């Protein structure tokens, strides 16, 4: 059973919240990604999939889009989770790990490395 539920977060859309306490350094979930050329990323970032985009770890001309519940983890500049990129055969997978203890009902957050609400 996953340690979270999909929850409507006021002012933030859907997100993930802990269904029970989650200890530090706990793997929360993982998901595979779609790989696409960097030239197509602009189309992704102009949609609701913006927060699902990750830089490719070894190819600067490509990007990755998360598929799965991890894509619902919202941004916070002081996150309680971190993401790790691992390669499984010829595909990339993103794992979500807790940084600190999360309380029941607490929203899971990542630092996207940029402010997704900022206007260019």
Image (cartoon, rainbow, N blue to C red):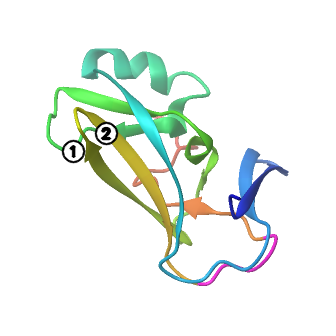
Mark found first going from the N terminus, 1 or 2: 1
Magenta span: 101-105
Residue drawn at x 39%, y 55% as measured from the top left: 113
Residue 72 percent location from the top left of the image: 64, 44
- Rate crowding at label 2 as few (under 14), some (14 to 19) or many (20 or more) other CA atoms within 10 Å: many
Q: Which mark is residue 38?
A: none
Task: Indicate the quadrant containing the N terminus: top left, top right, bottom left or bottom right.
Answer: bottom right
The quarter of the picture where residue 92 lies is top left
Task: Indicate the quadrant containing the C terminus: top left, top right, bottom left or bottom right.
Answer: top left
Establish if 27 lies above or below 70.
below
Q: CA distance from mark 1 to mark 2?
A: 9 Å
The residue wearing badge 1 is 57
For this view, does 114 lie left or right of residue 70?
left
Q: Are marks 1 and 2 in contact (CB under 8 Å)?
A: yes
The residue wearing badge 2 is 92
Q: Secondary structure at mark 1?
A: loop
Most foreground residue, 78 or 118: 78
For this view, does 51 lie left or right of residue 103?
left
For this view, does 21 lie left or right of residue 75?
right
Residue drawn at x 30%, y 30% as measured from the top left: 63
Count of residue discs? 2
Establish if 3 lies above or below 103.
above
Establish if 84 lies above or below 57.
below
For this view, does 50 lie left or right of residue 39?
right
């Amino acid at each position: 059973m996953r340690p979270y539920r999909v929850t409507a977060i006021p002012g933030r859309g859907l997100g993930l919240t802990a269904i029970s306490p989650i200890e530090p350094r706990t793997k929360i979930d993982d998901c595979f990604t779609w790989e696409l050329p960097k030239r197509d990323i602009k189309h992704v970032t102009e949609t609701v999939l913006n927060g699902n985009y990750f830089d490719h770890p070894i190819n600067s001309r490509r990007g990755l889009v998360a598929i799965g519940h991890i894509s619902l983890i919202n941004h916070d500049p002081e996150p309680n989770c971190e993401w790790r990129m691992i390669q499984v055969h010829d595909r990339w997978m993103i794992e979500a790990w807790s940084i600190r203890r999360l309380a029941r009902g607490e929203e899971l957050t990542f630092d996207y490395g940029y402010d997704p609400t900022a206007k260019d």
